[in-house]
Each structure stands twice: as C-alpha cells, then as structure tokens.
Amino acid sequence: MQTNELIFATHNANKAKEVKALLPHLEVKSLSEIGFHDDIPETGKTLQDNALIKARTIHKATGKPCFADDTGLEVEALYGAPGVYSARYAGEGANSENNMDKLLAELDAITNRNAQFRTVIAYIDNTGKEHLFEGSVQGEILKARQGGEGFGYDPIFLPEGETESFAEMSAGRKNTMSHRGRAMRKLVEFLKG
Ligand code: ITT
C-alpha cells in the first residue's frame, strides 16, 4: 500500500463519495475498491460497537490502517429510534424507501419531529491502536420527501436553520454541516497532527 492510501471500511458508495471529498490528499479506497465483498454483520448495540466491528474486521483482513463509519437517525419522539437500527428499520432487507415510509407513518400524528443524525467513526492506525470520532447534526423530519440527491433518509431530513433537506443539497454542501462531515473533520485534524 502506498503511504497516502487509506481504507474506508464501507460498502456504501454514497458514503465513500462524501468521505473522499473530505480527504482530497489521501487515496481513500472503499471495500469494493480493495476487492472485499463480504457482508460485515453489524451485531453491535451502539454506533460505536458497529463502527469498531467494521474497522476491526477490515484491519484483521488487510493488516492496514482503516476506518469505518456507523450512522444512525435518532428521533426524539421515538426515544432515539431507529438509531443503531436505521438500516433495517422496516425489517431485514429493507431499503431506504421502505425505511422512510415506515418513519413517516410512525410520525404521522406526532408534532415533535426533532431528530439528529449521529456518526461514529472508528479509525485503526498502523500500530493497531483504535481511535473514535463523533459528529452529529440536529434537525427535523419532514412530512414528505424533498429532493433527489444524497441517500438513505436524506429526503426527509431538514437540518436546523436550513430551508433545504439534505437531498436538496449538493454532497459538498451537505458535508459542511452533516454528522459525517463533522466526524470526518475530527479524523482529518487527528491525521494531520
Ligand atoms: P456501511 O455499513 O457499509 O458503511 P450502511 O449503509 O450499512 O453502509 P450504516 O449502517 O452506517 O451504513 O447506515 C445506517 C442507515 O442510515 C442506512 O439505512 C443508511 O442509508 C442511513 N444513513 C447513513 N448515513 C446517512 C446519511 O448521511 N444520510 C441519510 N441516511 C444515512
């Protein structure tokens, strides 16, 4: 591996795109780009657990420095759900459309639509030491989808103080305020130091 390469332990191409824009000086490789196609079961009970599971799996398989991101959408009126279960909120094998439909239905009669996205990044360095970074963004769940950019729950998330959902923003603009952008900037600072 060249010294400017860093593995991002994700199968999510949209996440990889966002993260690559934040690490322009490094050659970030996603799992498909290193030929790792196995599913990594996310069996943890917290975002931190799952971020560590993904990073440890790839560090073990490659012996190289790597990082992973685990993200959840935490809705106040649902006591933090779907949270760590965001990917399979509408059941095993659910896609983002199913998950958004379920969330919109759950919140149908609820006026408190406050929510936050939270990301935990686990980075394992070249000595095998683990480092954690967190980022979050407050906002609210819209009544209906808005916009066609982004991925996951982006069409129904309106960040606080904004007039556009994450799915109405470019990836670059989303990065300036998002959970992942905030966690990634902490990783970037750490890597610089
Ligand atoms: P990897 O584990 O391979 O990185 P994933 O898509 O499974 O990819 P997560 O477990 O972190 O990633 O994601 C949990 C869910 O939250 C999943 O349904 C995503 O689509 C959604 N999600 C993650 N980041 C998001 C973001 O920035 N905007 C909207 N939804 C997001």
Image: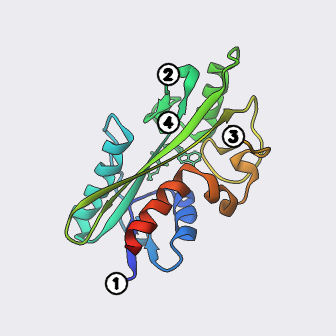
Q: Residue at x 69, y 40 (%)?
A: 160
Q: What separation in Å lies between label 4 and label 2 (alpha carbons)?
A: 13 Å
Q: What separation in Å lies between label 3 and label 4 (alpha carbons)?
A: 20 Å
Are the residues flagged by discs 2 and 1 in contact, CB closer than 8 Å?
no
Horizontal arrangement in the rendering, residue 154 relative to residue 27 (left or right): right
Q: Residue at x 66, y 60 (%)?
A: 171
Q: Residue at x 29, y 69 (%)?
A: 65
Q: What separation in Å lies between label 2 and label 3 (alpha carbons)?
A: 19 Å
| Residue found at the far bottom of this picture | 2
Give above or below for 162 relative to 65. Answer: above
Between 56 and 191, the residue placed more toward the observer is 191
Q: Amino acid at mark 2?
A: Tyr
Residue 54: image location, x then y, percent: 33, 53
Residue labelled 4 has its Cβ within 8 Å of some atom of ligand 1? yes
Quadrant for the N terminus in the image: bottom left
Residue labelled 3 has its Cβ within 8 Å of some atom of ligand 1? no
Q: Which residue is mark 1?
A: 3
Question: In the rendered structure, which disc, 2 or 3, sits on the residue that comes first in sequence?
Answer: 2
Q: Amino acid at mark 1?
A: Thr
Are the residues flagged by discs 3 and 4 in contact, CB closer than 8 Å?
no
Residue labelled 1 has its Cβ within 8 Å of some atom of ligand 1? no
Q: Which residue is mark 4?
A: 86
Q: Which residue is mark 3?
A: 160
Numbered badge on residue 79: 2
Question: In the rendered structure, which disc, 3 or 4, sits on the residue that comes first in sequence?
Answer: 4
Residue 164: image location, x then y, percent: 77, 46
Mark 3 Cα-neighbour bin, 10 Å: few <14, some 14–19, many ≥20: some
Q: What separation in Å lies between label 3 and label 1 (alpha carbons)?
A: 39 Å
Are the residues flagged by discs 3 and 1 in contact, CB closer than 8 Å?
no
Label 3 sits on a secondary structure element that is loop
Residue 136: image location, x then y, percent: 52, 45
